[in-house]
Image (cartoon, rainbow, N blue to C red):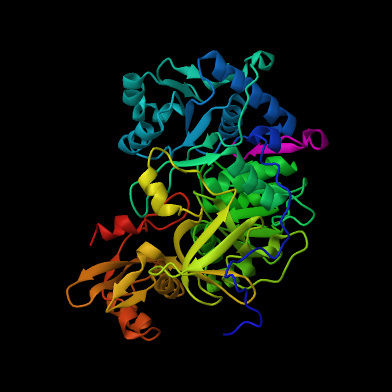
Amino acid sequence: MECREEKQDRIFRSKLDDIYVPNHLPIHTYCFQNLSSHHSRPAIIHGTTGEIFSHREVELTARRVAAGFHNIGIRQGHVIMLLLHNSPEFVFAFLATSFIGATATTANPLYTAAEIDFQAKISKPKLILTQGCYVHKVEDYALKNGVVIVCVDPPRRPYLHFSELKKSDETLMPDVKIHSDDTAVLPFSSGTTGLPKAVMLSHKNIVTCISVQVDGENPTLHVHAGDLTLCVLPLFHVYSMITIMLCSLRVGSGILIMAKYEINELMGLIQKYKVSIAPFVPPILLEVAKSPEAGAKYDLSSVRRVMCGAAAMDRKLQETVREKLPNATIGQGYGMTEAGVLTMCLGFAKKPYKFKSGSCGSVIRNARMKIVDPLTRTSLQRNQTGEICITGDQVTKGYFNDPEATMKTIDEEGWLHTGDIGYIDCDDELFIVDRLKELIKCKGFHVAPAELEALLLAHPAISDAAVVPRTDKATGEVPVAFIVRAKGSNISEQEIKQYVSRQVVSYKRIQGVYFVNEIPKAPSGKTLRRNLRARI
């Protein structure tokens, strides 16, 4: 397909004009900059308890917790580990960390003690905030390294309770001068293509990422004060942390917090509280699409927008979800830990654009994108598939204490090489093909697992699927599938192979099938292919 016009420099920019971004401000100052206009509106609704906190209460509580941190010896530049499920305490502690000029690092509380220990040895926290039931995972590390443990609920041992920090006098909190390049957050990359690495995100990085989504006359992500956003995706992941929590605080809207995901509870909360914005990942969308109770038992008509991120949503799934959520604009965003949001569906803008199913949206404003040949590194034109690269003020400073990994990811000109394969079409919309390191190389051809997975998921007898490479002496690698049968299904390996063979070229055919109870996924929704490859 040829485009009418071709940008000669092969650099792609947003359809929306760049805006002024006040990224000289620290996160807390920026998020509460317009507090006076919405201070009494709900900022947090706790889905489990029904508790409601206004924007004024969130800001005040965060300042008190910051004073509490200071009282127990936390200082500017120290690291605080948030080992928590979604909760109001996560929000208070995250913002308090910004107020005091410290750095927040996040970890999944369901990790094993060894996985948490790995992250702690890199980030070196001075304080770990967690629940009593997870204390045993961090006690040894804390004892050996003089780390303070604080619990958000009554611990089994005499550790400090988070409620004590909330009682601190906020007026005694000393002034802290924060530079925009100071590291505000130290999340870890997913680890799906190697060992997890600590990503340094500065105040400038995060404020830029929020601003390019919700600021300006025509915001890319139009969220107004009357909106209520469902927060079921884990706040320890940057997608939820930035696009849900921080964007909502900036515009004065509310978030409905779910501590843990359960499909019927999720739909019940949407109905009860009239949720208007639902950020999801493909596995949740798949459950909504296949649920007979969505739209029947539960009224989901309040949802005006469904944002899908963290992993690609194919066209068929997108169209199926429309049947269950008829009032919603359903589109995608694309981002990564190292740069926050990279692209977003412009159907989400205040003045929306038309967009295609399966598209990940258009390049975010104030950034530049290019598609490069993975081998030659030359920039490619529209409709040519290559590695996606981006540059802008939201791009990480690099990996903490890992200059080698930083240089492999961010080149000398400041371009972040995402490791994702895709193309930009004639309408400036981005389509993801696959991960560069997850492409299966069969007989010299590249096979995209995501393409085969989309075919498999379209089969009514298959509930979930993942495709990974298996080493083959003759061809190098061949694709094999891990399959979760749908309830009541007895589909066989042979039936699956024949089903795929009818729809793809010979080298893309499935050469083996493994039936499993579930597909392992990261909290972001990405398939953990490394775990599956280890089972072959």
Name which residue lies at 36% across and 68% down: 439
Name which residue lies at 33% across and 33% down: 117
Residue closest to the far right: 37
- Residue 328: in sight, yes or no? no
Which image quarter holds the N terminus? Answer: bottom right
Q: Residue 294 location in percent, x, y?
A: 60, 61
Name which residue lies at 37% across and 18% down: 146
- Decide whether residue 299 is among the magenta residues: no
Question: In front: 504, or 426?
Answer: 426
**With respect to residue 228, does 169 lie above or below?**
above
The magenta region covers 32-48
Residue 508 placement, left or right of 45:
left
Count all numbered tags in the image, as a single digit: 0
- Decide whether residue 33 is among the magenta residues: yes
Residue 127 placement, left or right of 484:
right
Q: Residue 402 location in percent, x, y?
A: 37, 42
Which image quarter holds the C terminus? Answer: bottom left
Question: In front: 343, or 247?
Answer: 343
Question: In front: 326, or 79?
Answer: 79
Q: Residue 341 location in percent, x, y?
A: 58, 53
Q: Residue 527 location in percent, x, y?
A: 40, 58
Residue 10 image-quadrant placement: bottom right
Residue 467 image-quadrant placement: bottom left
- Residue 374: in sight, yes or no? yes
Residue 69 placement, left or right of 117:
right
**With respect to residue 210, does 420 lie above or below?**
below
Residue 143 image-quadrant placement: top left
Question: In front: 67, or 398?
Answer: 398
Name which residue lies at 58% across and 75% down: 425
